[in-house]
Image (spheres, rainbow, N blue to C red):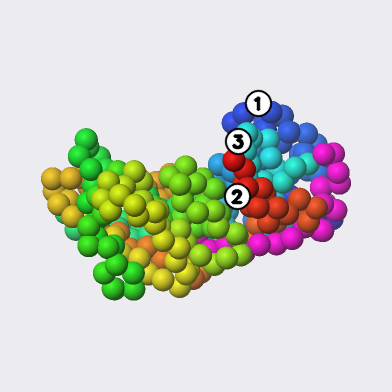
């Protein structure tokens, strides 16, 4: 019999659903579970990845949120059969190493995106290098982000970045409210690329960096690349594929 560990968001509906699932399937310790089952929206899946991905488990999210792009619908079917017949997709999170204006080093993992944002009323100025080659001398904007395929429908989409299929092995580099160059819409990069973003005038134009929901302030440079050892496995109902969700999102108008 399959062992589950259920976790939920703080909404009343999600908490009630979690209790119902526990009554039906019982609750296992995450270390002993076969599957981690987050209940809610994409946010609880993201939190569960941060909390439990080091256990090398698969994740099957059940949608009780408003969007739940990475979640599955559950209509009273047998959960164990649904999971056994699901499709597994492997995702690589981002590894971020940042240095602040005192040369202090910060490291974090991001499953959605790493974003740099201005801390004051002044626009930020960035220099962008890809694999140690300077590709952007000066980007003037409110911020810039690097998104995984899983995060491409979150903050990245709100910033008018491209939606990425989960199996694309691409990263989206997207400016936030770009002032110069005004027409630059960002770039799509292979997961194999290493990205370095230098903050120009970092003393006068302070910038923070956020890896998912973990923030560091007064940053002067950030290194970003796909993690080689933090691969996560997300399961999707084969009858409601993530590919269909991505296509539907791209053709909405």
Residue 174 placement, left or right of 217: right
Location of residue 131 in the rendering, given as x and y in whole percent from the top left corner: 34, 73
Near mark 2 (Cα within 10 A), the count class, few <14, some 14-19 or many ≥20, is: few
- 1 or 2: tag closer to the N-terminus: 1
Picture disc at residue 250: 2
* Front in this rendered view, residue 168 or 181: 181
Mark 1 sits on what residue?
Answer: 12
The CA distance from mark 2 to mark 3 is 27 Å
Determine whether the residue tagged by mark 1 lies in a helix, strand or loop: helix
Dot 2: element: helix
Where does residue 59 sit, x and y in percent of width and height? Answer: 66, 54
Q: Position of residue 137 (x, y in %)?
A: 22, 62
Residue sticking out furthest to the top: 12
Q: Nearer the viewer, mark 1 or mark 2?
A: 2
Q: Residue at x 78, y 41 (%)?
A: 74
The residue lying toward the viewer, choosing from 203 and 31, is: 203
Q: Residue at x 70, y 53 (%)?
A: 244
Q: Residues within 10 Å of mark 1 (few under 14, many from 20)?
A: few
Q: Which residue is mark 3?
A: 9
The magenta segment: 75-93
Image x and y of residue 161, in percent: 46, 51
Q: Which quadrant of the structure image shows residue 85?
A: bottom right
In reply to whether residue 22 is colored magenta, the answer given is no
Residue at point 50% right, 58% down? 148
Q: Is residue 83 left or right of residue 233?
A: right
Please tell me which of labels 2 and 3 falls first in the chain.
3
- Tell me whether the residue at label 2 lies in contact with that at label 3, contact meaning CB atoms closer than 8 angstroms: no
Quadrant placement of the N terminus: bottom right
Q: Is residue 94 above or below residue 66?
A: below
What residue do we see at 23% from left, 47% from top?
Answer: 124
* Residue count near mark 3 (Cα–Cα under 10 Å), binned few <14, some 14–19, many ≥20: many
């Amino acid at each position: 019999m399959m062992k589950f560990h259920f976790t939920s968001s703080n909404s009343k509906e999600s908490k009630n659903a979690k209790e119902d699932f526990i009554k039906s399937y019982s609750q296992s310790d995450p270390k002993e579970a076969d599957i981690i089952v987050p209940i809610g929206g994409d946010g609880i899946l993201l939190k569960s990845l941060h909390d439990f991905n080091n256990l090398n488990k698969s994740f099957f999210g059940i949608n009780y949120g408003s969007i739940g792009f990475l979640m599955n619908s559950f209509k009273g079917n047998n959960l164990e059969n649904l999971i056994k017949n699901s499709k597994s997709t492997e995702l690589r999170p981002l590894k971020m190493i940042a240095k602040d204006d005192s040369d202090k080093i910060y490291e974090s993992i991001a499953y959605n995106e790493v974003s740099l944002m201005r801390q004051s009323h002044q626009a930020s100025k960035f220099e962008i290098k890809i694999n140690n080659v300077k590709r952007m001398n000066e980007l003037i904007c409110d911020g810039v982000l690097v998104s995984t395929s899983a995060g491409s429908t979150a903050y990245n989409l709100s910033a008018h970045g491209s939606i990425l299929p989960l199996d694309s092995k691409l990263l989206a580099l997207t400016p936030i409210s770009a002032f110069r160059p005004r027409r630059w819409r960002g770039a799509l990069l292979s997961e194999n690329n290493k990205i370095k973003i230098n903050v120009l005038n970092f003393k006068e134009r302070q910038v923070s960096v956020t890896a998912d929901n973990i923030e560091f302030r007064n940053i002067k440079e950030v290194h970003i690349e796909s993690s080689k050892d933090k691969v996560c496995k997300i399961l999707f109902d084969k009858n409601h594929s993530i590919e269909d969700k991505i296509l539907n999102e791209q053709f909405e108008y």
